[in-house]
Amino acid sequence: MPCSPRARSIAVSTCSAVGTLYAVAAGTGAGSLILLTALGAPTPIAGLLCVAVTTSVRLAAVRFGWAFPEQRAVRLRRPKIPVKTPAE
């Protein structure tokens, strides 16, 4: 049974999804597929180029250490409103 990404992250005490460019690589590859098919490229050729672009962006991100900043919790400061109690 393969290890889920979350279980793997817990097992090695890291969070691999934070700050990585998986979505950017996938979006770039999908964009290249859409662009190439719109320009009239044969679908199998466009598909192979899509895979090449996606893989290249992902490998470049790993090689050069490209990452998004880590997410931080947003803390909203709410003004304290005095609670009115009925006078006795």
Image (tube, helix red, strand yellow):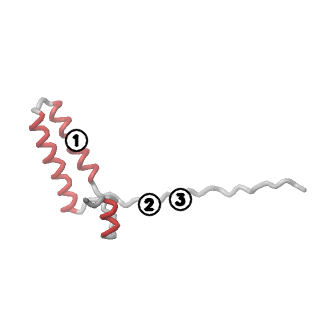
Q: Earlier in the sequence, mark 1 or mark 3?
A: 1
In this picture, is 13 found above or below 34?
Answer: below
**Of labels 1 and 2, the one closer to you:** 1
Instruction: Name which residue lies at 68% across and 58% down.
Output: 80
Residue 72 has which mark?
2
In this picture, is 53 found above or below 36?
Answer: below
Amino acid type, residue under disc 3 in the picture: Arg
Amino acid type, residue under disc 2 in the picture: Arg
Residue 28 position by quadrant: top left
Query: For the residue carrying disc 1, how many other residues have a C-alpha within 10 Å: few (<14), some (14-19), or many (20+)?
Result: some
Residue wearing tag 3 = 75
In this picture, is 57 found above or below 36?
Answer: below
In this picture, is 28 found above or below 13?
Answer: above
> Which element carries disc 2, helix, strand or loop?
loop
The x and y percentages for residue 70 are: 37, 61
Q: Earlier in the sequence, mark 1 or mark 2?
A: 1
Instruction: Name which residue lies at 20% across and 35% down.
Output: 34
Residue 30 has which mark?
1
The x and y percentages for residue 75 are: 53, 59
Residue 18 position by quadrant: bottom left
Distance Cα–Cα, label 1 vs label 3: 35 Å
The x and y percentages for residue 5 are: 30, 59
